[in-house]
Amino acid sequence: MSTQPSMQDIQKINNQKGGESDSFNKFSKGLRGLGLLAAWLEDLFFPKFCLGCQKEGAYLCGDCRHLLDISEFNYCLCDRPAKLLTTQENRLPGKCSKCQDKKLSGLYFALSYKDNSLTQKLIYQFKYQPYLKDLAKTLASILIEHFVLAKNNTDEIWENSVLIPVPIHIKKLRERGYNQSEELAKELSKVLNVPVVSNVLVKTKSTKPQMELKKEEREKNLENAFEINPVRNGISNGVKNLFLNKKVFLVDDVYTTGSTMNECTLILRNSGAKSVWGIAVAREE
Ligand SMILES: [Zn+2]
Ligand SMILES: [Zn+2]
């Protein structure tokens, strides 16, 4: 018998974690109709404006989305000038010779993160006031477009895998009200049909923002910042580990030097993950 958790097992455990009962589910279904009404009222009283051109209607209008250079290629995960890595048969992201020792197996990213770009604006507003949580849908759809363009949306890539959001510290969570990476993972999960494992990989140390630090300080900043919560990692159905022997896709908004993902990868690999891959909306250039 396989000891690996199925999609259903993970969803069951996720539901238990939230403490949602059947009656709560019925109640929330009833609320869905009200939710639609609320969304309509919200649009009426709090209209959305495009972050690119201020046009009313959405946070990213069709014209501005069109201007984004969504990558149709796979690149190495190093921060050197992007090295195109495509082999004849498969176009899976790989690593250049300099990156062979890095723990992360590869990185998927859709956009380049440059100063004063629309990409920077979108990601900034997703994380800072006025906290546009809805941007998760837009940014996830950009990632999906990348997967399709780069021919990465295949069963082979997503089989036997889980999405794990890069965690944030509880202090940050209270401040923002949500973990932006978790929101992204949830949106990706709906399309990719890969379960999300949240609150298992946790951040126990409050750290300085990586982007404010020099390269040499970044690794030190993250030392012992993450851990696996053993109680949440499998509590029923004989499932001991929600990502045992699975391919883990770590989800984050921006990939900078890779220190965050590297630190998370070490912990996940030591705890039984088969391999760990990164998914980021954008990579800093
Ligand atoms: Zn626009
Ligand atoms: Zn490289």
Image: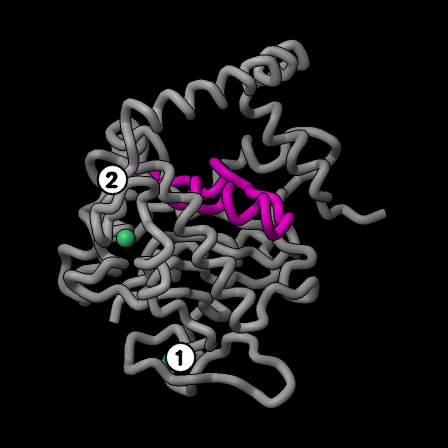
Mark 2 neighbour density, 10 Å: few (under 14) some (14–19) many (20 or more): some
Image quadrant assignment for residue 25: top right
Q: Residue 239: x, y in percent? A: 70, 38
Q: Amino acid at mark 1?
A: Cys
Between 16 and 268, the one nearer to me in the picture = 16
Numbered disc 2: secondary structure: loop
Q: At 28% across and 63% down in the image, what residue appears?
A: 256
Distance CA(mark 1)–CA(mark 2): 28 Å
Mark closest to the chain's N terminus, 1 or 2: 1
Q: Is residue 176 left or right of residue 10?
A: left
Q: Is residue 10 magenta?
A: no
Is 65 located above or below residue 193 in the figure?
below
Circle 1 packing at 10 Å, graded few (<14), some (14-19), many (20+), is: some
Helix, strand or loop under label 1: helix
**Mark 1 sits on what residue?**
99
- Nearer-the-camera pick, 204 or 172: 172
Residue farthest to the bottom? 88
**x and y, in percent, of residue 6 in the image:** 73, 44
Which region shows up in magenta?
180-205
> Left of 18 or right of it: where is 2?
right
Question: For disc 1, does the CB lie below 8 Å from ligand 2?
Answer: yes
